[in-house]
Image (spheres, rainbow, N blue to C red):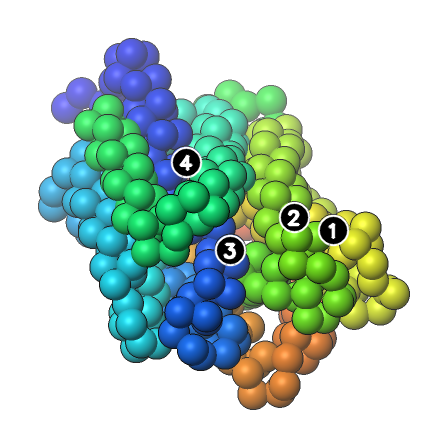
């Protein structure tokens, strides 16, 4: 069985993944639409913004299922299907005339389309470059972050010139074309052989075994990684989803000044993806995650304890976005460090449910306890717990019920 692809196919798949991720990242401009949608529907912004929590949850669920879809239909066909669903869902959102329609179209359908394409194309790309997983992940997820920045300007322009409904139609058309074209450029990564690898970071004889999902979920490390991931996602997604509203209603900034937070978040998100993603090929990824959590703690603590003005608000949300972007870039490779590369789409897919659960939980806490501050305090507590986990977690040994062959880790996880 041929387990190699030509360099041209690898690079074409990388380019297609970057294009697809750029379009899928456009959902992170959602806070731009909360106020216009609230005016259109006549409902409170808090209830309208809840659609982003539903979107994030649907995205996470779809991501956890995308590995099975890829096995059956291939990365190209599933990506094209995701593009068609994303475009159609945004068009349907333009016709939403009630909250339940908004939750269905913008929440469930857009989230499902985005999640189906996001994790599958990312892990497929990472598997093509096993010796440079961090760099490949940084390129792909960096494009996802850059998409939120690029579409911030696109969607602001469309809103000001074409109105709310037509903006959703045009946004859907642009994103659909980009995802379909990207999908046509992709090839499925071959199954990785269990071979040793020379890596500049590998300093021990630690071994990583290919865990199946049932084997991985029996380990304590799996659930520690899941809690750490949920923590950063709760912080990042909640703040991203309501950044403009936090700026206006909590910091008391003007609408224009608060809206600039969307661009600040996009830039910081992108920098986190690139900086921490590249760093993760040079030092132990658990240490990179610990650093990301410390930065997140600084950002959330600033929102709670500092006297906020525009600059301190921008600093706080930038820290949170930097941490979030870097964490989701490093995590596919981190999961493969612990549980092997061949099953990373399925193993990371379950951990990735924390992406949606975190965002959803943040919105629920804010709704039940009267606003942003309660969620901020919950974030702080979870971040402290996660930092302890990040500095104490150890690499698992061979699964007890496994018959798979051990292989040397591409990137050794430091045992401290």
Q: Say whether marks 2 and 3 touch (CB < 8 Å).
A: no
Q: Quadrant of the N terminus?
A: top left
148, 310: nearer the viewer: 310
Q: Residues within 10 Å of mark 3 (few under 14, many from 20)?
A: many
Q: Dot 3 corresponds to which residue?
A: 32
Q: Position of residue 161 (x, y in %)?
A: 43, 44
Q: Is residue 112 left or right of residue 48?
A: left
**Above or below, comparing residue 108 to residue 180 in the picture:** below
How far is the residue under mark 3 from the one under mark 1?
Answer: 17 Å
Circles 2 and 4: CB atoms closer than 8 Å: no
At 46% from the left and 63% from the top, the residue drawn is: 36
Q: Nearer the viewer, mark 2 or mark 4?
A: 2
In the rendered image, the residue lying farthest to the left is 72
Q: Of circles 3 and 1, which is in front? A: 3
Residues at circles 3 and 4 in contact by the CB criterion of under 8 Å: no
Q: Which residue is mark 1?
A: 314
| Position of 179 relative to 40 (above/below) | above
How far apart in space, not on screen, are marks 2 and 4 (Cα)?
20 Å
Query: Which percent across, then down, holds residue 400?
Result: 37, 58
Q: Which residue in the structure is indicated by mark 2?
A: 260
Element type at mark 4: helix
Kindly identify which residue carries mark 4. Answer: 22
Specify the label residue 305 is tagged with.
none
Q: Which sits earlier in the primary sequence, circle 1 or circle 4? A: 4
Q: CA distance from mark 1 to mark 2?
A: 9 Å
**Of pointers 3 and 1, the one earlier in the residue sequence:** 3
Say what secondary structure mark 1 lies in: helix
């Amino acid at each position: 069985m041929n387990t190699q692809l030509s360099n041209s196919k690898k690079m074409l798949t990388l380019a297609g993944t970057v294009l697809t991720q750029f379009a899928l990242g456009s959902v992170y401009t959602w806070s731009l639409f909360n106020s216009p949608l609230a005016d259109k529907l006549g409902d409170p912004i808090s209830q309208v913004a809840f659609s982003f929590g539903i979107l994030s949850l649907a995205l996470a669920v779809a991501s956890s299922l995308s590995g099975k879809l890829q096995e059956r239909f291939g990365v190209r066909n599933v990506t094209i299907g995701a593009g068609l669903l994303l475009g159609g869902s945004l068009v349907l959102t333009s016709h939403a005339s009630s909250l339940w329609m908004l939750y269905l179209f913008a929440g469930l359908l857009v989230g499902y389309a985005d999640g189906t394409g996001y994790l599958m194309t990312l892990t497929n790309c990472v598997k093509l470059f096993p010796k440079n997983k961090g760099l490949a992940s940084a390129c792909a997820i960096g494009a996802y972050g850059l998409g939120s920045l690029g579409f911030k300007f696109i969607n602001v322009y469309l809103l000001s010139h074409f109105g709310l409904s037509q903006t959703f139609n045009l946004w859907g058309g642009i994103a659909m074309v980009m995802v379909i074209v990207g999908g046509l450029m992709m090839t499925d990564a071959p199954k990785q052989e269990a071979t040793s690898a020379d890596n500049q970071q590998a300093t021990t004889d630690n071994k990583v075994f290919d865990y199946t999902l049932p084997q991985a979920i029996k380990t304590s490390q799996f659930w520690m990684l899941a809690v750490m991931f949920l923590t950063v996602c709760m912080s990042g997604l909640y703040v991203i989803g309501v950044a403009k509203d936090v700026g206006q209603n909590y910091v008391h900034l003007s609408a224009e000044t608060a809206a600039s937070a969307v661009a600040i978040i996009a830039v910081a998100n992108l920098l986190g993806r690139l900086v921490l993603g590249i760093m993760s090929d040079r030092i132990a990824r658990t240490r990179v995650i610990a650093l990301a959590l410390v930065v997140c703690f600084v950002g959330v603590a600033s929102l709670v304890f500092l006297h906020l003005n525009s600059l301190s608000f921008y600093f706080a949300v930038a820290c949170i976005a930097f941490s979030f972007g870097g964490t989701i870039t490093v995590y596919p490779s981190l999961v493969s460090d612990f549980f092997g590369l061949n099953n990373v789409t399925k193993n990371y897919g379950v951990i990735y449910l924390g992406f949606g659960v975190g965002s959803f939980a943040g919105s629920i806490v804010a709704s039940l306890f009267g606003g942003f501050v309660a969620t901020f305090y919950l974030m702080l507590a979870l971040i402290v717990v996660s930092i302890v986990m990040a500095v104490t977690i150890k690499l698992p040994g061979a699964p007890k019920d496994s018959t798979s062959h051990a292989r040397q880790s591409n990137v050794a996880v430091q045992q401290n």
